[in-house]
């Protein structure tokens, strides 16, 4: 809020952001690649410089399972912008097997539990202002 001319108050609320929403599925490790051809850059969803991180497990889809990466991301975004955060999607891609009409996906439950725990730690221990969390599913 800023005071305008002749004692009026001017609000500059239009075009501002009240919170930051983002999706988090995985972290990605990258390397420098000197090949900058168009063909080389149209690989792996634009992540042609990505490399496997041997310290982090991956899903059947090759997605890194990195709850610490979520906590780190929450901290970086909050420290930088000082706005409430909303995780609008967080989930786990896997090749699911249907057995007796059901998918027994304990691996997905563990993923979600670990990532929700990391988000809680970011709030309780690091002071991040997290206003929401929405899980994602591929079915």
Image (spheres, rainbow, N blue to C red):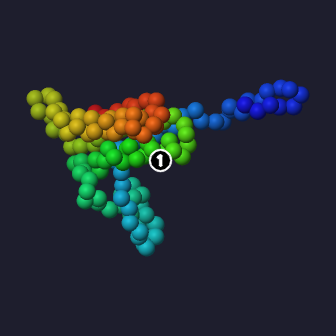
Asked whether the viewer can see residue 85, the reply is: yes
Residue in front for this viewpoint, 126 or 66: 126
Q: Is residue 18 left or right of residue 23?
A: right
Crowding at dot 1, Cα within 10 Å, few <14 / some 14-19 / many 20+, comes out as: few
Can see residue 43? no
* Residue at image location 16% in from the left, 38% down from the top: 97
With respect to residue 124, does 35 lie above or below?
A: below
- Disc 1 secondary structure class: helix
- Residue at horizontal 46 percent and vertical 30 percent from the top: 131
Residue where numbered disc 1 is placed: 76
Asked if 36 appears above or below 9 in the picture, the reply is below
Identify which residue is drawn at 23% across, 51% down. 57
Quarter where residue 34 is shown: bottom left
Name the residue nearer the viewer: 3 or 106. 3
- Residue 69 vertical placement versus 100 (above, below): below
Q: Residue drawn at (54%, 37%), measured in percent from left and top? A: 83
Which image quarter holds the C terminus?
top left
Image-quadrant location for residue 28:
bottom left
Residue 100 % position (x, y):
10, 29
Q: Position of residue 52 (x, y in %)?
A: 29, 60
State which quarter of the image contains the N terminus: top right
**Residue positioned most to the front:** 125
Q: Is residue 43 left or right of residue 104?
A: right
């Amino acid at each position: 809020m800023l005071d305008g001319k002749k004692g009026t108050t001017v609000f500059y609320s239009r075009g501002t952001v009240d919170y930051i929403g983002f999706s988090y599925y995985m972290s990605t490790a990258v390397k420098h690649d000197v090949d900058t051809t168009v063909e080389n850059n149209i690989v792996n969803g634009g992540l042609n410089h990505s490399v496997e991180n041997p310290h982090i497990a991956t899903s059947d889809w090759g997605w890194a399972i990195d709850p610490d990466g979520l906590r780190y991301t929450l901290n970086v975004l909050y420290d930088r912008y000082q706005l409430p955060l909303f995780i609008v999607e967080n989930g786990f891609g896997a090749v699911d097997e249907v057995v007796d009409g059901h998918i027994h996906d304990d691996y997905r439950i563990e993923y979600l539990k670990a990532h929700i725990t990391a988000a809680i730690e970011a709030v309780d221990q690091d002071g991040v202002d997290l206003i929401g969390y929405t899980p994602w599913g591929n079915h």
